Image (cartoon, rainbow, N blue to C red):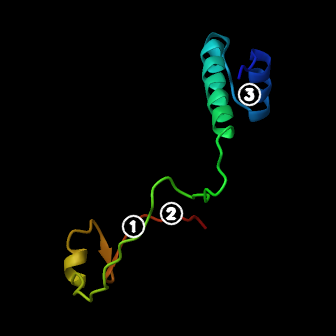
């Protein structure tokens, strides 16, 4: 399926994309190839084919939660550049 340069310019304008003239021939070929491929896909008989959300089956692998000891408070603060009253001291981010 062929797409014209005028159509590309109109789509670019509506999409708020900048398309440079020296790149127009390349974009025209790529979009034409994509539209040709989509037209081929539309010709396929897909009766009885269930729609898919992903091309490959997905499944989560969960492990059992295990309670483990956490890092000691003093050890966690030992490498902090600054600590105050048992907490990490960081620069103020929110101004009043």
The residue at which mark 2 appears reads as 93
Q: Answer above or below: position of 63 versus 36.
A: below
Q: Earlier in the sequence, mark 3 or mark 2?
A: 3
Tell me where residue 77 appears, x and y as whole percent: 25, 75
- The kind of secondary structure element at disc 1 is loop
Tell me where residue 94 appears, x and y as whole percent: 55, 65
90 vs 8, nearest the viewer: 8
Q: Answer above or below: position of 92 versus 77.
A: above
Q: Are marks 2 and 1 in contact (CB under 8 Å)?
A: yes
Q: Residue at x 23, y 86 (%)?
A: 68
**What whole-number distance in Å separates the C-alpha atoms at marks 2 and 1?**
9 Å
- The kind of secondary structure element at disc 2 is loop
Residue 26 falls in image quadrant: top right
The residue at which mark 3 appears reads as 12
64 vs 78, nearest the viewer: 64
Seen in the image, is 78 located left or right of residue 15? left
Q: Earlier in the sequence, mark 3 or mark 1?
A: 3
Seen in the image, is 64 located left or right of residue 4? left
The residue at which mark 1 appears reads as 90
For label 2, count other residues whose C-alpha is less than 10 Å away and answer few (under 14), some (14-19) or many (20+).
Answer: few
17 vs 46, nearest the viewer: 46
- Mark 3 against mark 2, which lies toward the viewer? 3
Q: Answer above or below: position of 91 versus 18.
A: below
**What whole-number distance in Å separates the C-alpha atoms at marks 3 and 2?**
40 Å
For label 3, count other residues whose C-alpha is less than 10 Å away and answer few (under 14), some (14-19) or many (20+).
Answer: few
Pick the quarter of the image with the N terminus: top right
């Amino acid at each position: 399926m062929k797409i014209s340069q005028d159509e590309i310019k109109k789509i670019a304008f509506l999409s708020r994309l900048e398309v440079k003239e020296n790149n127009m021939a390349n974009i025209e070929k790529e979009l034409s190839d994509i539209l040709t491929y989509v037209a081929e896909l539309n010709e396929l008989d897909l009766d009885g084919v269930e729609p898919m959300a992903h091309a490959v089956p997905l499944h989560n692998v969960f492990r059992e939660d295990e309670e483990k000891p956490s890092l000691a408070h003093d050890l966690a603060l030992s490498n902090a550049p600054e600590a105050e009253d048992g907490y990490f001291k960081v620069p103020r981010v929110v101004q009043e």
